[in-house]
Image (cartoon, rainbow, N blue to C red):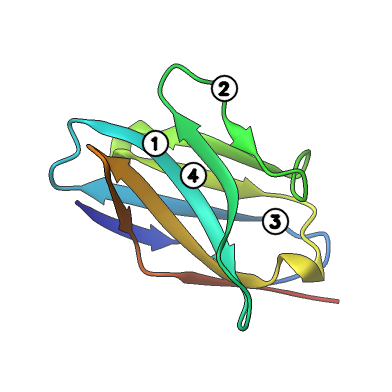
């Protein structure tokens, strides 16, 4: 399974970005796709995830501002991020859970400046 993340960048407070994660390879049994984020010195934290037949999970820290959705064209997920804050600055990672294994995409940097 290969994951390709894109869409990061630099925005000002209150701005918006959409992250995209495209999955390829052996994804016929793809279970859950998620977005994590990490700042230097901290552990990676779950931001949002989607599992088939379940409501999406959105972390409280971003609830009401971030939305996760399927991108069927790319066999992946999108993370729509609105009302961005400086504390959202991080490297964002896409994750896929397939048949008991976890796969990671490369990170994409999001920087929010005031």
Q: Residue furthest front?
A: 100
The answer to which image quadrant residue 55 occupies is top right
Label 3 packing within 10 angstroms: few (<14), some (14-19), many (20+): some
The answer to which image quadrant residue 86 occupies is bottom right
First in sequence, mark 2 or 1: give its number: 1
Q: CA distance from mark 3 to mark 1?
A: 25 Å
Mark 2 or mark 4, which is nearer to you?
Answer: 2
Q: Is residue 54 visible?
A: yes
Secondary structure under tag 2 reads: loop
Mark 1 or mark 4, which is nearer to you?
Answer: 1
- The residue at the point 22 percent across, 37 percent down is 99
First in sequence, mark 3 or 2: give its number: 3
Q: CA distance from mark 4 to mark 3?
A: 13 Å
Q: CA distance from mark 3 to mark 2?
A: 23 Å
Q: Which residue is mark 2?
A: 55
Q: Position of residue 85 (x, y in %)?
A: 81, 64
Mark 3 or mark 1, which is nearer to you?
Answer: 1
Q: CA distance from mark 2 to mark 4?
A: 15 Å
Label 2 packing within 10 angstroms: few (<14), some (14-19), many (20+): few
Mark 3 or mark 2, which is nearer to you?
Answer: 2
Q: Which residue is mark 4?
A: 78
- The residue at the point 39 percent across, 36 percent down is 32
Mark 3–mark 2 CB contact (< 8 Å): no
First in sequence, mark 1 or 4: give its number: 1
Which numbered circle lies on residue 32?
Answer: 1
Q: Which residue is mark 3?
A: 16
First in sequence, mark 4 or 3: give its number: 3
First in sequence, mark 3 or 1: give its number: 3
Q: Is residue 10 visible?
A: no
Label 4 packing within 10 angstroms: few (<14), some (14-19), many (20+): many
Q: CA distance from mark 2 to mark 1?
A: 11 Å
């Amino acid at each position: 399974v290969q994951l390709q993340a894109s869409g990061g960048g630099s925005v000002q407070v209150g701005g918006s970005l959409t992250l995209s994660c495209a999955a390829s390879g052996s994804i016929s049994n793809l279970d859950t796709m998620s977005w994590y984020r990490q700042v230097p010195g901290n552990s990676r934290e779950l931001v949002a995830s989607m599992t088939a037949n379940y409501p999406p999970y959105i972390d409280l820290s971003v609830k009401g501002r971030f939305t996760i959705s399927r991108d069927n064209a790319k066999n992946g997920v999108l993370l729509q991020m609105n009302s961005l804050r400086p504390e959202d600055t991080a490297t964002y990672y896409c994750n896929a859970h397939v048949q008991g294994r976890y796969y990671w995409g490369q990170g994409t940097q999001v920087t929010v400046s005031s």
